[in-house]
Amino acid sequence: MSQLQENSWSIPQRQAKAGLVIILAKATVTIVKTLWPILLVLLVKKNKKGIDTFELTLMALPVIILVRSLVGYFYFRFFIANDELIIRKGLISKKTITIPLQKIQAVHIEQNLLHQVANVAKVKIDTAGSEKTEAVIDAIEVPKAEQLKEFLLREKRHMTEEAAIPSPIRDIPVMRLSVNDLLKLGLSANHIQAFFIVFAFSISMLQNLEEVFGDRVIRLVKDSSSEVGISVVSVSLVIGFVLLISMFVSMMRILLNYFDFQLTETSQGFRIKTGLINTSQNLVPFNKIQYISWDANWIRRKIGLFNMEFHQVMSDDQSNKKKRVKVPLTQPAYIDKLLAHYHGMVQPSALADYGIHPSYTTRRTLLRGILPVLLILIILLLINWDPWYFLILLWIPIVALHAFVFRRNFRLYVAPDALQVNSGTWGRKTQIVRWYKMQQVFLQQSIYQRSKALATLHLSTAGGTITIPYVPLKLAQQIQDYTLYEVEREERAWM
């Protein structure tokens, strides 16, 4: 700890003075999100003779939130002592967070737009064996954040056994997205998903307006729609308008998430810097990667674009998406580069490959197509007769086609140290996992599968589960036994 006194980390540190702006902005957002519907009702209400007790209480809530935020700012301290990072906060309800430096796994630096204006940053600290962020130090000067990150990671390396073997510090650029790459990603994105986002936002806004202004909004929408009328031209214009909005939303999402995207390789993992308004610098440690997957829809496959995900350690109390680090790939050659520190493609050197049993298509069609459609159709016809209801029968061939294509594209490739799963219907998805990364393997059998000696295999890692449906029971049992054998035999830790 020779550098401790030199960097003054042993002295309790405060947030930056500019951080007060961040704290107050967060408090303001909290107040607006909590009280805006009620405040809007109070502004438009007819009776304005006086202020009652309820309104007085509402006026006091923002003051309480602001005071609490100010207290949190003035009583926040962090420092390093006895090889531990210590964070203390709170006045009445005091809280102390202690993190041993040797357990620190990754240190991330993030900046949203307000952070950039105030020239401050947020530091997030992850520890080994935990998937959630253990500590957050918000609103400190950017140079101090960089120094703290460098110091924590350097001290962690010095106190681990890995530091006994000197390794050169690497910072090798791997990929960077250009404006042309962002344009291709935006145009080939999932516009259907963007459409539903716009649709859900519109419905939410309509409901909020209805709560405030009553039925007048609904009547206005109905009157406007009746005046426009329905025609082929109007419907085409609406579809075209929705498509343009969806493409615009997709483009903005790509721009906000992947502007100035840079991925570099370090001695510990992949360092990723990205974002337009909310910029972030994250480290994906090699040892925390549980398995790797990448996929592409039909359009992106044609132009060589893929979306790779590093599935890291997860816990039950956090959303899976938070530990699925996504990397947009604009060239197929990037796949081999990013797989190099985990495992290469299994398919070329696989000892065997397997598919799904043909009965998958018929059972999928029966359970997700025929039975639900017949049930819904009978209920609708009992309520009211309408020949248009029979259009729901079109769902059956759609499900059948989907199941058939999925079964045809599915392949399982097995190698001595890893397995690879190729799947997908209209798009394609590939998953690669090392045997020793497995946490649990279990078989699932329905009554039909037992009669046909089939099983569905679930391979669970700390980063998620890979499912292999409708394979022969004997094969599933062999994979299960081999997985347990490799986990016991392998001396390397899964993380």
Image (spheres, rainbow, N blue to C red):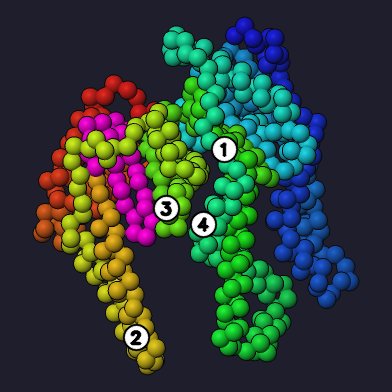
Q: Earlier in the sequence, mark 4 or mark 2?
A: 4
What's the distance in space between the residues labelled 1 and 2, CA to CA?
52 Å
Judge from the rendering whether residue 67 lies leftward or rightward of residue 357; answer left or right. right
Residue 451: where, in percent of width, then height?
10, 59
Q: Residue at x 18, y 41 (%)?
A: 352
Query: Which quadrant of the figure contains the N terminus?
Result: top right
Q: How busy is the neighbourhood of tag 3: few (under 14 within 10 Å), some, or many (20 plus)?
A: some
Q: Earlier in the sequence, mark 3 or mark 2?
A: 3
Residue 176 tag number: 1
Residue 186, picture quadrant: bottom right
CB under 8 Å between callouts 1 and 2?
no
Q: Residue at x 80, y 62 (%)?
A: 55
Q: Earlier in the sequence, mark 1 or mark 2?
A: 1
Residue 169: where, in percent of width, then height?
53, 17
Residue 301 tag number: 3
Please tell me whether residue 263 belongs to the stretch shown in magenta: no
Judge from the rendering whether residue 335 lies leftward or rightward of residue 153; answer left or right. left
Q: Nearer the viewer, mark 3 or mark 2?
A: 3
What's the distance in space between the residues labelled 4 and 1, CA to CA?
18 Å
What's the distance in space between the residues labelled 3 and 2, CA to CA?
36 Å
Task: Give the magenta-colored segment's residue range.
Answer: 413-440
Q: Which residue is mark 4?
A: 188
The amino acid type found where label 2 is placed reads Phe
What's the distance in space between the residues labelled 4 and 3, CA to CA?
10 Å
Q: Earlier in the sequence, mark 3 or mark 1?
A: 1
The amino acid type found where label 4 is placed reads Ser
Residue 390 tag number: 2
Label 4 secondary element = loop
What's the distance in space between the residues labelled 4 and 2, CA to CA?
34 Å
Q: Earlier in the sequence, mark 4 or mark 3?
A: 4
